[in-house]
Amino acid sequence: MSFKSLGLKEALIKAVEEKGYTKPSPIQEKAIPHILEGKDILASAQTGTGKTAGFTLPVLQYLSDTKHPKYRPLRALVLTPTRELAAQVYDNVREYSKYVNIKSAVVFGGVNAKPQIATLKSGVDILVATPGRLLDLHDQKAVSFKRIDVLILDEADRMLDMGFVRDINKLISFMPEKRQNLMFSATFSKDIKKLAEGILRNPVSVETAPQNSTAKKVTHKVFKVDKNKKTEFTIKLIKDNNWNQVLIFTRTKHGANKLTEKLIKAGISAAAIHGNKSQGARTKALKNFKDNSIKILVATDIAARGLDIPLLPHVINFELPNVPEDYVHRIGRTGRAGAAGEAISLVCSEETEYQNEIEKLLNEKLKSNIVEGFEPTDTAPPKRAASQSKGSFGKKKRPGNSNSSEGNKAKRKPHFKGNKPTSTSGRGRTGAPKKKRF
C-alpha cells in the first residue's frame, strides 16, 4: 500500500517522502482513511509506529481542502501531556505541511507566554498544546475554540495519569459539539475507554498491536543487582560496552540528579531531564543527547512520552517503574520504526514485585542475570508487599504529578459529564457551542 492509495494529496506525499518514508505503517494504513472520512477514532498503537503522522497527515489535508481564502481561525487542536511531546508533534506538523498553506504553532508552559500570544493573534490553523498553558491563554482571551473542527488527544492515558481530566473537560466546554475527535495512545486502560465514551461519537477502533505490547526488535535484559551497587554497575555497563547513547530512567527527580552527578564524576558525559528543570535546560539536554554531545540522558517518567530519538540503541531502567504500563512507554524509546534496541532493567530485592507485575502485563517472563561482584545481598522486602503489610496499600497507586511541571491537578478518576453530540455525521462549525455542564 502507498500513501497515495490512502487518499492523501501529492503535496503531503512529497513532504512525507522527503522524510524518508515511502510506505505507510500499519497504524497509518488503518487510521488515515477513517480520519479522511470524518469519523471519530479511538486508536491504540505502540510507540515508534508512526501514529503522529497517522493523525497529522489527514488533518492537514482536511484543513487545506477547506481553508477560508481570507480568515485563519483555529480549527484543529492537538493536546499532549508534556512539553517534549508537544514540541515533537509540532515539528512533525511543520514538516508535513511545508507544501500546503497551513499555519501551525505550539504552546506550553515554562517559557514566556508573550511570543505565544503574538503568534496566536496572527492566525493559526492547527495548534499543538499542553492543557495547562492553553487554559491560561484562553483565560487571557488570546485563543478561541469556537471554530474547532478537529480535536486530537495524543497520549491520552498519560494525560489521565498526570491529572489533566478537569482541564480537558474545561477546554472541551468551549468547543462546538459538532467536531471530529481523535484519541491516540500507546495503550488504553479501562479508565481511558470510559473517558473516550464521553468524548468520541460512534468511534472506529483502530489497533495495530496488542495492548501493552513492546516493539518486536527490543531485547529485554534483567540484572539482579544490589541496591547500593546500581550506580557502579551502570557505570561498568556503559564503559565495558563503550556505549555512546543511553537513556536511563529513574523514579524520582532527586535520583536523576544524583545519578547524573555520579556519572559525570566517573568521566561519562551526562545530563538530567525532569519536571524541576527549566524548559531551556530540558531542551538543551535533549538536543545535546540527540546530537551525541553527551552520552547519557537520565530522565524521570515525564520523558517516557515525547522523546523521539532515532535509532536509540539502549534504555536502562535504573529503577523499575511502580506502574507496569510505564515500562512499556520507557522502553518504547528504543526499537522505534523497526530498528533494533535493548532494554536493560536493574532490579533489587525491593523491586521484585514490580518485575512480576511487568511480566504479567507483557505476558512474558523476563530472564534474570546475576553478575559476579554485584550480587543482590540486600534483604529488604518488595516495596509493594511492605506497603500492604503496613495497611497502606489498598489498590495500586499511580505516580502523582511530582515529575510533571505541567500536571498540577489532583489525581482523579476520569469523569466526563459533557453532553454527547446529537449529530453523528459531518464536520465543521455549527455556530456557538451549546453550554455544557462539567
Image (cartoon, rainbow, N blue to C red):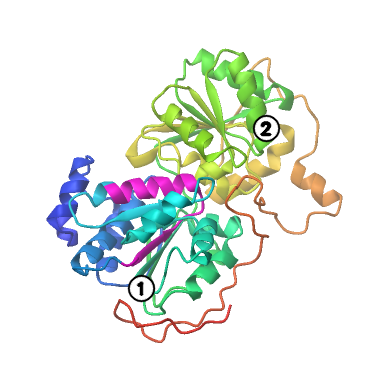
Q: CA distance from mark 2 to mark 1?
A: 45 Å
Indicate whether 420 appears above or below 29.
below
Residues in magenta? 73-94
Location of mark 1 (residue): 147
Residue at (52, 63) in percent of width and height = 135
Residue at (63, 48) in percent of width and height = 357
Give the foreground label among 2 and 1.
1
Residue at (62, 45) in percent of width and height = 403
Check contact, mark 2 vs mark 1: CB within 8 A. Answer: no
Q: How many marks?
A: 2
* Quadrant of the rendering where the C terminus is positioned: bottom right
Amino acid type, callout 1: Arg
Q: Seen from this angle, which residue lies furthest left?
A: 10
Amino acid type, callout 2: Gly
Look at the image and tell me whether residue 370 can be seen: no
Judging depth in this view, the residue of 295 and 169 nearest the camera is 169
Judging depth in this view, the residue of 250 and 97 nearest the camera is 97
Q: Which mark is residue 255?
A: 2
Q: Quadrant of residue 322?
A: top right
Q: Secondary structure at mark 2?
A: helix
Q: Is residue 79 magenta?
A: yes
Residue at (35, 65) in percent of width and height = 74
Classify residue 347 as left or right of residue 47.
Answer: right
Classify residue 297 as left or right of residue 395.
Answer: left
Q: Earlier in the sequence, mark 2 or mark 1?
A: 1
